Amino acid sequence: REAQIPLYILNDPRSWGSQTHSTLEDALVDLRKTVSDNVIQNALALREGSAFERGRFVGQLEKEMAWQAYDAARKTRDALMDARRRLRMDKVEDWGGLTEEQLRAK
């Protein structure tokens, strides 16, 4: 019962549905198929999980991607502001208006 395997009946003249077989070999073929189906169903249930678990995983994945995009945008914005600040501080003087003596002094 715990393995969800139906009871197979051998050599019973009464009709029990699809579980009635004339020989043990016939019953074993159906038993093997039932066990195999149960193993596959359980493996898929373990691997795929429930719809709730899949939805939760997708939600976590979306949230993680949103955080990564936010972090990349923040780093880009910070780098741009640093570059602007450096340009303002490192601004080169215009020496075009200086006289020859002033150029020599510099």
Image (spheres, rainbow, N blue to C red):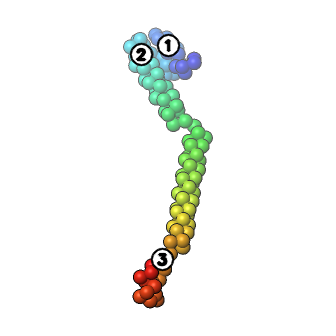
Q: Which kind of residue does numbered mark 2 sit on?
A: Leu
For the question of whether residue 10 can be seen, the reply is yes
Rendered residue at 49%/15% (across/down): 8
Work out whether 64 lies above or below 76.
Answer: above
Quadrant of residue 55 within the rendered picture: top right
Which corner quadrant holds the N terminus? top right
Who is closer to the viewer here, 100 or 25?
100
Q: Which kind of residue does numbered mark 1 sit on?
A: Ile
Question: For the residue carrying disc 1, how many other residues have a C-alpha within 10 Å: few (<14), some (14-19), or many (20+)?
Answer: some
Q: CA distance from mark 1 to mark 3?
A: 97 Å
Instruction: Please state the horizontal and vertical placement of residue 66, each as a whole percent of the image.
Output: 57, 54
Which mark, residue 66? none
Which corner quadrant holds the C terminus? bottom left
Instruction: Please state the horizontal and vertical placement of residue 92, each as a whole percent of the image.
Output: 48, 77
Which mark, residue 92? 3
Instruction: Please state the horizontal and vertical placement of residue 46, each as a whole percent of the image.
Output: 52, 31
Q: Which element is circle 1 on?
A: strand
Q: CA distance from mark 3 to mark 2?
A: 91 Å
Who is closer to the viewer here, 77 or 95?
95
Mark earlier in primary sequence (1, 2): 1
Rendered residue at 47%/25% (across/down): 39
Closer to the eye: label 1 or 2: 2
Mark earlier in primary sequence (3, 2): 2
Q: Which element is circle 2 on?
A: helix
Which mark, residue 9? 1
Q: Which element is circle 3 on?
A: loop
Which mark, residue 28? 2
Rendered residue at 41%/82% (across/down): 104
Question: For the residue carrying disc 2, how many other residues have a C-alpha within 10 Å: few (<14), some (14-19), or many (20+)?
Answer: few
For the question of whether residue 13 can be seen, the reply is no
